[in-house]
Structure formats: structure tokens, C-alpha cells
Image (cartoon, coloured by chain):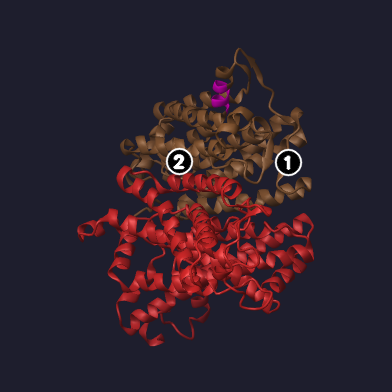
Amino acid sequence: MLFSSLLLGALHAMVPLTMTATGEILSERAGVVNIGLEGILLLSAFGAVVGAEAGGPLAGLVVGLGVGAILGLIHGVIAVYFRGDQIISGVGINILALGLVAIGIVWQWGVAGFHQVDRALRIPHLVTPLGSMSPMVIVTVLLAALTYYLIHHTNLGLQIQAVGENPAAADAAGVRVERVRLFGAVYAGALAGLAGAYLSIDWLATITRNLPAGRGFIALATVVFSRLNPFLAVVGGLIFGFFDGLGLLASTSREITQVVPYQFIQMLPYVVTLLVVTGVIGRARFPAASGQPYRRE
Amino acid sequence: MDPRPGDDQAAESSGAADRRRVVRDAAGTAGQVLLAAALGLIIGAVLMEIAGYDWTRAYQGLWLGAFGDPWSVADTLASATPLILTGLAFGLCFRAGYFNIGGQGQMTVGALAAVVVGAYIPVPTPVAVFLVLLAAGAAGAVWSLTPAFLKATRGVHEVISTIMFNWIAFYLALYLAFYSLNDPQSAERTVRVLPGVRLAPLLAGADATAAIFIAAGIALALYWLLWHTPWGYEMRVAGLNPSALRYAGASPVWTINWTFMLAGMAAGIAGATQIIGRPPTYALYGDLSNLGDLGFDGIAVALIGRNHPIGIIASAVFFGALGSGARMMQIMAGVPLDMVRIVHGVIIIALAAPEVWSIIAKSLVRRRAARTEPVSAQAPNSPARR
């Protein structure tokens, strides 16, 4: 009983981390780094609730994906075509999303900071031997596999790797560097958008002004952990997700919070992320031109 | 390397031509920032129009709340005080090529240290204020040096580690404020600091205290450090060209630690100013609400201030005005406080791509040149024109 709820908790907590990380892996392979993932998760989570209340859970997922893709597009245009600073643009997206969602919650529901999502609007769950499980768990693993295939076994994937490693050579070989990079940025935004929708209309079933609670950044840590391999992002997502789920589970259990104050349980995922990243990172190698704008000579 | 706003290194060389270039660059930068700020306010107005608010009345309220009377001005300065320091915490690291997103956590532990030292250590007043600032700075430095150490030894990216430290500080502070430092007489806040360390309002009934001078003084000191000492020179070289730093024989590890330590101290002292320099509470609220998002806002402050200590002072005052004006905006037009955050976000996204601005500027210059061609055929910066 405890084991299955812990495993289920880890699987559910894995979804936003792995899904967001998977998109970002492809984007970083192409040379665009987005630290605005936290903001994309937040704004698309909000969009998904609005969409779901207008047209059901599927509409919510579509809106979330769309909001994420638009934010990814904005970031991509700034990074690729305007050759802007990717970190500054990402910071801007985080701040903008926080403002839009804080105000959006007031505008939409007339409450400050917290809105519960109706049970009927949540994504229907599957019945499994472990218990009720979100179909998004399966979608996440499939997306990771698809992304791996895309990067390593398609022509587009070859182009993505080329523009990330050596954009000048790719350009000389006739690859449209800007378009491939923009595709990466939009792909990362769209997957983060789907993950944001999952947060609000599935897993946590609420929208608050701080719903992702750092998960966008833990997803970045997952990217680092994965060494840009989507399958390892599933493993990383499960490790980080286990402690995230454990924290959620433990902070609602009276027996545990009497021994360990809930603030320390809540700290757990962040401490674990630090420890894991400290342990593995030395061996990571990133594409040579990641984060750098490309300027044609 | 990606382009960094570091044009002002020309200040090192002397000569009238250089000085003119510095002035022109500074004017260009200021122009970009003003354009971006205008864009932020315009998009804010459009959003308010869509949502059905009276945006003219809202901006009237914004102005009155920020500069309407001496108390509003004091309010603006009081809001600017911590932002100068958290802005420095980000800007200093940015100058050296690092992204310190951890100002929030560094400020939080600084505030905790300020409460502990300010409330429990009875010493004569001037010494006590100094001790509180020192303790807060030291706490912030501990919180920033760990990510610096992890980056230097294990290659952990500071964006990830500092964010994790923010969350750890957040829950640590919630715990301590609730269980260890709580005031038995008042459930919603910690114990108050001793009267001796409380900085008095500059104006009866206003929020601003001498803390604004502490913050501005630290900004000026860091300006001096960056542009008039060898250590500051090394920090700037680290940001512009890390390999040049290594070839010159300086240690990158040393520069990382030194930069993050100073940044953490600034953010820690920002926390202290919220405890000893902001009447009437002189304590930390149990939900940390008197720290708010000041650490994160510092990132925006620094980026808009172009990561220059003097620019950061100016941009912190701008942010302070938005912050204190937002309350009047809410009273007069019913616009939620977070409206100003949208304005921040738009400004920063607009500033992320400086090339857009130079493209616009170039096309403007070209158009003007085309218009004035018959009168003066000289290029804009030919000697005759000067």
C-alpha cells in the first residue's frame, strides 16, 4: 500500500520534470537554452484551466500546449533572429508569467492567488494495479522515446545536432540554422506547456501564482543530469520526482509531520536536486554552440 | 562570447574622444532603457484597457502614489532601498559572467541573521547597527558561497544551485520564524529587534530610513571596486573574456568566490534593511511577506540598470516608484498590484535583444540623414560635426 502510493507519487511527480526536460534537451541540442521554463509552466497551467473550464480537459491540454509554444516562439525569435541574450529573455518570461498569472487569477475568478479546479475538468485517470494513474505518465515516456528517435534517427535530428555543435559548418552545408533552432525553442515551449497543463488540470488540480514551485528549474537540473539523453531524463525525473512525491505525501501525514516539521520535508526535493547535480555534473558535455547566437559572416 | 553590455570599459582610457564615446554609449543605453520602459507601460495600458480598467486614472494613481507628496517620495525611496542591494547581488555577478538567481535566498537568510542579532545581542547603538549589517552580510555570503564553491569545484551551474538554495532558505525561514524566533505576544511575526538598532524614519510617519544611504553607499563602494581596483578589473575581465583572465595568471576560482561573496553580502544586507530599516514592524513576518519577491525583483532591477551600480540605483528608484505607485493605482482604479510585474517582464524581454534597438536606431539615423542630406552630407560622427 505504502509502496504503491510512493511509486505512483514518483510517477506523477516525474511527468512535469521529464516532459519539460525532454523538450529542453532538444532545444539545447539545437543551441537554444531557455531558463524561462518555470514561467512557461506557470502561464500554460493557467491557460489550461481557462481552456478546460471553457471546453473540457482536452481543450485545456491544447490551450496549455499552445501557450507554451507561443512563449517558446517568443523566446526563440529573440534568441535566434534578434541574437538576444537567452538568459535575460528567460528571466523576462519568468517575471512576465508571474505577473500575468497573478492578475489573471483575480480577473478570471475574482479570488486572490488560489483557484481549485473542478473534478469533472481533470484529465480522466486510468485504472492500474497500482491505483488510479494519469495517462500523462505514459504520454511522457512516449514523448521521451519519440524525442530520442527524432534527435538520433531522423534527418531533422542530424540538423539539430549540427546547428548546436557548429552552426557555421551546418550553414555551409545548407542547413537553415535559424529555422532549426526556432523549431527547437518552440518544441521546448510546447512540451513545457503540456507539462504546465498537467500540473493544473491533472496532478495538482489547482492554479496558484506559484504552482510550478521551482519545477521548471528542477527540470533544468534534469536536463543536466540526463546529459541531453531523453531516456536518462525519465530516470532523472523519477529520482527527483520520488522526493517531490515523498514530500507531498509526507506533509499530509500527521505521524510524519509530528517527528519532522513539514518545512523540512518540503525542502527535500531541492536538497536532493542539489546533491544529485553535484554528484553527476562533472561528466556532462553540452553542444559547443549552446546558448550562443549565430551570426553569419 | 555573446554580447554583454560592457561598453563602458572605455572609461579606463583617457582622452576627450574616449570620454565622448562613453557619454554617447551611456546616452544610447539610457535611450534603450527608456524605450523599453515606455513599451512596458504601453502594454500595461493595453492590458488594462482590455480588462476594462480606466488606465489613465491608473497611471495617474501610479504617479501620485510614487511622487505625489513627500511621503510618497519617501515610500518610493523605502521600496528602492532593498532593490538597490538585491540588484547589486545580481548585477555584480553578471559583470563577472555568472547568473546569481539566488538573491532571494541570500536576502532571506540575511533577514534571519538580522532578527537574531538585532533582537538578542544588547550592545551600544552604532555598534549594534554595524553588527546587524555584518551578520546579515555574512549570512548572505554563506548562502552565495556554497553555489560558488559547487560551480568552481564540481561545475554545477549556478542558475540551478542558487534556485535550490532559494527554496531551502524559504522553508528554513518559515520554520525558524514559526518555531524558534516567533514572538509569544504576536503570532504573525518574529520577535522585534531591540529599539537601539531600529533606524528611525527620515520623515515623521514615512517609511524611508537611513537604510537608503546604506544601500546607496554600498552601490558607490562597489562602483569604485569595479572600476578603480585590480580586483574589480579581474571581475570584469572574467565576464568579458574568461580565458584572458586565465592567461593573465589570475585564478578564475578565486574570482568566482570573491564575486559571489560580495553579491551574497549585498543581498544579505538587503534582508537586514527590511528588518531594521523599515518602520513600523522591525521584525520578520511569519509568512515572510515583508521580504516578498525583493530578491527576484533585484534581477529585473539589475538588468534594467544595465548591471552598472549607478544604473542599478536609478532603476531601483524606478522600481520603487512602480511599487509604491501600484498601491495608489489599486486604490484609485482597482488595478491589482501585480500589474507592475507585467510591466517589469515586458521591459526585460524588450531589453534582451539589444540588436532590435540598434536596428531601429540605425533606420532612424538613416532616415534623418536622408532628410538632412542637402544641408550636411557628413557622416554623423565625422570630426567636423563635433
Question: Is B26 covered by the magenta stretch?
Answer: no
Name the residue that disc number 1 marks.
A115
Quadrant holding the N terminus of chain B: bottom left
Q: Can you tell which of label 2 and label 1 is closer to the viewer?
A: 1
- Pointer 2 indicates a residue of which chain? A
Tell me, by letter, which chain the rendering colours red. Answer: B
Q: CA distance from mark 2 to mark 1?
A: 38 Å
Q: Is residue B90 above or below residue B220?
A: above
In the rendered image, residue B328, in percent from the top left (x then y), is placed at 73, 67
Tag 1: amino acid: His
Name the residue that disc number 2 marks.
A180
In the rendered image, residue B233, in percent from the top left (x then y), is placed at 30, 67
Mark 1 element type = strand
In the rendered image, residue A44, in percent from the top left (x then y), is placed at 63, 41
Q: Outermost residue toward the front?
A: B122
For the stretch drawn in magenta, what is the main secondary structure? helix
In the rendered image, residue A231, in percent from the top left (x then y), is placed at 44, 26
- Pointer 1 indicates a residue of which chain? A
Tell me, by letter, which chain the rendering colours brown. Answer: A
| Residue segment shown in magenta | A6-12
Tag 2: amino acid: Val
